Each structure stands twice: as C-alpha cells, then as structure tokens.
Amino acid sequence: VTFRGHKVLRTLIRCHFSPPSATNSRYVYSGSADGKVYIWNMDATLAGKIDVKKATMGTRRVDRHTRLYFEEPTGWGTCVRDASWHPSAPVMVASAWNGYSMARGTCTLHAFNESSDDEGEPEMRRSVDAMLRPNPDMYQMSNY
C-alpha cells in the first residue's frame, strides 16, 4: 500500500501506526514538510489532516515599535518532523520546525476524532471522555 499526500523535503519525517488502545491501530500517520500531519486509513484513503502550520502561525514575538517580527520576514514556514498519538486519548503531539526562516521549533497538542458513524471492526472505543478522564466502562477491576 502506498500512502500519498505528505511531502518529505530535506529531512527525515517519521510515519507511525496509531495505537491499538486508542484507535485499534486503524490509522497510519505522518508529519509533512507542508506543515500538516496526514492521517490515512489502512486502505490508504485519507482519514484527516491536522494543520500545524495554521495552529502555530504568528506565535513569534513582534517588536512593539515597528510591529515587525524579530525573525526575517521570509514567510512563515512549518515542517512537521514527527507526531505521537496518545496511547489512550484522541490527541497527538506534533513536533515541528517553524517560524520565519524555520529557525525555531514547537511541540503542539492536537485532537483527532473520527466521525460518529464508525464502521470499523471492532467498533472504536474511547478510554477517556472529552475532559480526558478515564472511561470506567473501559477498565475492569483487578485483584492486583
């Protein structure tokens, strides 16, 4: 299977399978030189995109007198080098080079929720609620 859509330019960009406890390992995801995280279904169709560039745009300091950014005004760039999906929550962290001249870096937290009409087998489960509190239905009592 070939997953298409992400861009790899001048650096290593990692690709991962989503965690079994959060998504039943049904996705492959990767950063991209265009500032996005791409998420594919196992049949290579695009399941979603997370726009890290848009989320981090303009987060650098501005000179209060000239209103210019301290970095060179060559245009905001973002290259998502890696992403990591939380093992049991519908969130991931993306690490990226970004800024004007991409001389800085960020780690940002993003949510990814599948559509409500999940047709996968086995059915997708949630081990946490919207506030990231453990879902008691997903855990069983133990004598340990």
Image: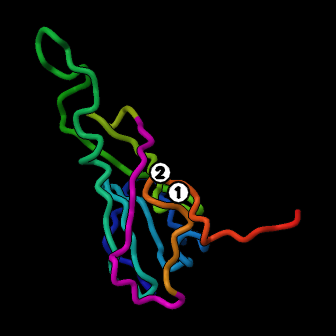
The answer to which quarter of the image holds residue 56 is top left
For the record, the magenta segment spans 105-122
Q: Where the N terminus falls, by quadrant?
A: bottom left
In the depicted structure, whether residue 31 falls above or below residue 99: below
Give yes or no for residue 72 being in the magenta stretch. Answer: no
Mark found first going from the N terminus, 2 or 1: 1
Q: Amino acid at mark 1?
A: Ser
Q: Where the C terminus falls, by quadrant?
A: bottom right
Residue at the image position 34 percent from the left and 84 percent from the top: 117
Q: Which mark is residue 93?
A: 2
Mark pair 2, 1: CA separation: 5 Å
Badges 2 and 1: C-beta atoms under 8 Å apart? yes
Give the farthest residue toward the left: 66
The answer to which quarter of the image holds residue 102 is top left
Residue at the image position 31 percent from the left and 72 percent from the top: 5
Residue 7 pos. (x, y %) = 34, 63
Give the farthest residue toward the right: 144
Question: Circle 2 — which element?
Answer: strand
Q: Amino acid at mark 2?
A: Val
The answer to which quarter of the image holds residue 55 is top left
Q: Between 21 and 74, which is closer to the camera in this rendering?
A: 21
Q: Which mark is residue 74?
A: none
Q: Which mark is residue 84?
A: 1
Residue at the image position 41 percent from the left and 38 percent from the top: 106
In the depicted structure, whether residue 2 falls above or below residue 67: below
Give yes or no for residue 114 being in the magenta stretch. Answer: yes
Residue 29 pos. (x, y %) = 45, 68
In the depicted structure, whether residue 40 falls above or below residue 136: below
Looking at the image, residue 23 sits to the left or right of residue 50; the answer is right
How dense is the environment of label 1, judged by Cα within 10 Å: few (below 14), some, or many (20 and up)?
many
The overriding secondary structure of the stretch rendered in magenta is loop
